[in-house]
Image (cartoon, grey):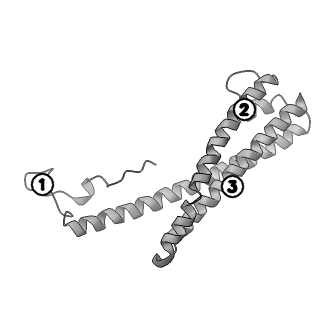
């Protein structure tokens, strides 16, 4: 059972690592596209975002693999409905436990790196959308006030909500 559980954990962690590495490469390509000159910028974004379907397919696959991991771990004797790598690792003995721990730490490090990259991307997108909103207001002459909030018709531009909301 020890070898089967270790193999199950390692295979699952390899799949997660592959997903995270691919996600990071896509996130970095999008970050790089923000710095490309305007003439080539759209091509850079198109290339980076073209892999989005591949990425969403990978997320669906990892969800399927997580369900399969939980079912298989329960069959191998890991108790509980909330099976995790850590709970499965606790049932391992010998040097293989360290191997699984190293793989889990690599995956955790990649997840942290992806979280940081996602934050940077969300800031980039937010800044660009805010600039786009301001350009549209300048073009449509709605940048000053609409009279919606005060009798005198004076409202700061920043009191309006952005055209697109981004959570994060």
Residue contact at pointers 2 and 3, CB within 8 angstroms: no
Please state the horizontal and vertical placement of residue 50, each as a whole percent of the image: 56, 60
Please state the horizontal and vertical placement of residue 24, each as a whole percent of the image: 63, 57
| Residue 93 in view here | no
Neighbours of disc 1 within 10 Å: few (<14), some (14-19), many (20+): few
Badge 1 element: loop
State which mark lies toward you, 1 or 3.
3
Q: Quadrant of residue 145?
A: bottom left
* Residue under numbered circle 1: 147
> In this rendering, would 90 be left or right of 27?
right
User: Disc 2 to disc 3, how far (Cα)?
Assistant: 22 Å
The quadrant of the rendering that contains the N terminus is top right
State which mark lies toward you, 2 or 1.
2
> In this rendering, would 28 be left or right of 103?
left
| Residue 69 in view here | yes
Figure check: 57 above or below 82:
below
> In this rendering, would 21 be left or right of 50?
right
User: Disc 2 to disc 1, how far (Cα)?
Assistant: 58 Å
Residue under the point 58% across and 52% down: 53
Please state the horizontal and vertical placement of residue 150, each as a whole percent of the image: 12, 51
The number of discs equals: 3
* Residue under numbered circle 2: 68
Q: Quadrant of residue 118?
A: bottom right
Which of pointers 1 and 3 lies earlier in the amino acid sequence?
3
* Residue under numbered circle 3: 21
């Amino acid at each position: 059972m020890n070898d089967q559980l270790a193999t199950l954990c390692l295979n699952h962690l390899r799949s997660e690592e592959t997903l995270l590495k691919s996600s990071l490469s896509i996130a970095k390509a999008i970050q790089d596209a923000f710095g490309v000159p305007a003439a080539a910028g759209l091509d850079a974004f198109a290339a980076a975002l073209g892999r989005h379907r591949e990425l969403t397919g990978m997320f669906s696959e990892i969800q399927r693999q997580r369900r399969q991991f939980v079912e298989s771990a329960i069959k191998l004797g890991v108790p509980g409905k909330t099976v995790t790598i850590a709970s499965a690792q606790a049932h391992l003995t010998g040097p293989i436990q360290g191997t699984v721990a190293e793989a889990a730490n690599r995956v955790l490090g990649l997840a942290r790196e992806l979280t940081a990259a996602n934050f940077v991307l969300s800031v980039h997108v937010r800044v660009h959308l805010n600039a786009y909103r301001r350009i549209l207001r300048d073009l449509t002459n709605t940048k000053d006030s609409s009279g919606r909030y005060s009798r005198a018709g004076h409202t700061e531009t920043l009191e309006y909500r952005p055209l697109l909301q981004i959570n994060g």
